[in-house]
Amino acid sequence: MIILLALFGTLIVLMIVGVPVGLAMIGASVAVLLSNRGFDNIPYEMLAQRTLYGVNSFTLLAIPAFLLIGRLMNASGISDRVFNVARSLVGHLRGGLGHVNVLSSMIFAGMSGSAVADAGGLGPVQMRAMEKDGYDRGFSAAVTASSATIGPIIPPSIPAVIYGALANTSIAAVFLGSIIPGILMGLSLMALVFIMSHRRGYPVSKRARLSEIIAAIGAGFLPMMTPVIIIVGILSGIFTPTEASVIAVGYCMIIAFLVYRTISLREFWVICRDTAVDTAALLVIIAGSALYAWVLARYQVTSQIIDFLSGAIESKYLLLFLLMIFVLVIGCFIDSVPALFLLTPILVPLVVSYGIDPVHFGVAMIFNLMIGLVTPPVGTVLFTVQKVANIPYGELVREIMPFYIPLFGMLLAITFIPGLVMFLPNLLLR
């Protein structure tokens, strides 16, 4: 009991007072060792070794690469090209630019793998076009925020890389398992956009001619090949997910510097610097979570949790339901990446003990945490879109309320219908 109190109580207290998640996990781990060994017997060399071991991973090299891809895409003018492709395909539907907003986010998701990159890079283009065509600013911002959550679902995905590394699960399988949920998520949002646009009388644009569609796809073809290169390369065995991320960086640099010529060397330096800062922040969390996971295993905390729940909960579906509620609550207060590092070492052994596939659970958990990005009080994407749209936070929250219906509906579907997640991994990898 003392160990559990030190491990979880210290972590909660440190996070409440504002200590960064990575340092809070290190502090909680040290608190456990203090309570068990005393100050004079703390294995400082082991602490250093475990934190260093956490970041010494070839797989995690994909994270800075995908972060760099997202920044390159935003800086090289790809957002406008992606938006024009989507506009030529679905702009003629009722509430056309709302559908364009969602579809362009789905396309951009295959390039950046980040919800914040989508909201901050593609978001201004989407909202500016929607307001120009007569859409309410609040509605435009709500569509932009909700569709941005598709970014980390459709591969490549930074959270999928993190989960795969932490859970010792195939990243390729998590990538494949995310494709169908990501597409269904987009389609469900488009269905809501259609209903709301019909009720509010939003305009219908003229259908694009075939020549305009071909021209738009031609202009956006090269960047849209990025996810194809990554997925095909991984599935064919040509390269690993980490190698795929580096190949994709090289491909994006060729597009930005040699084809479009939209990035200067000075701008590229700023992009690399910002990517390095983001990567360093993530590495602190990774190091802290590695030490935290070691303490969990060393003192058999996860085994105690499994033994307790096994006696109280028999149905794996009830377990999944309770875990999804728990993850959703956590996601409302902690950003998605720190939450993954915190929850994965605890929950994966638990779900595996109930016979739940870790790929299925991982996709459901990532999907759940993405909803947290647009849920108060700590919704990173909400704050990003609110800043870009320059609207009151309360208005944005009020406008996004209807969009929780398809988001939560899809969460329930992928949680309790494993085939939606496992169909492609089972088809292509097993």
Image (cartoon, grey):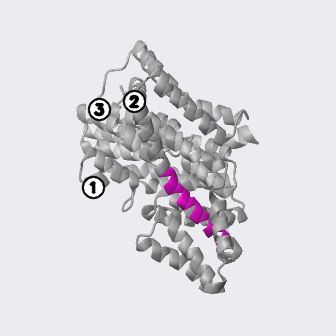
Identified at 44% across, 46% down, the residue is 274
Q: Is residue 25 left or right of residue 312?
A: left
Q: Secondary structure at mark 3?
A: helix
Q: CA distance from mark 1 to mark 2?
A: 28 Å
Residue beneath disc 3: 129
Give whichever of 225, 70 is nearer the camera. Answer: 70
**Mark nearer the N terminus (3 vs 1):** 3
Q: Secondary structure at mark 2?
A: loop
Looking at the image, can residue 149 be seen?
Answer: no
Give whichever of 132, 389 is nearer the camera. Answer: 389
Give whichever of 281, 14 is nearer the camera. Answer: 281
The verdict on residue 187 being magenta is: no
Residues under numbered marks 3 and 1 in contact, where contact means CB atoms less than 8 Å apart: no
Identify the amino acid type marked 3: Ala
Q: Main secondary structure of the magenta part?
A: helix
Question: Residue 33 occupies which quadrant of the picture?
Answer: bottom right
**Residue depth check, mark 2 versus mark 3: number of the one nearer the observer:** 2
Identify the amino acid type marked 1: Tyr
The verdict on residue 284 being magenta is: yes
Identified at 76% across, 42% down, the residue is 430
Identify the amino acid type marked 2: Gly
Residue 248, x across and y down, in percent? 58, 34
Residue beneath disc 1: 393
The numbered dot on residue 77 is 2
| Span of residues in magenta | 278-295
Identified at 64% across, 71% down, the residue is 47
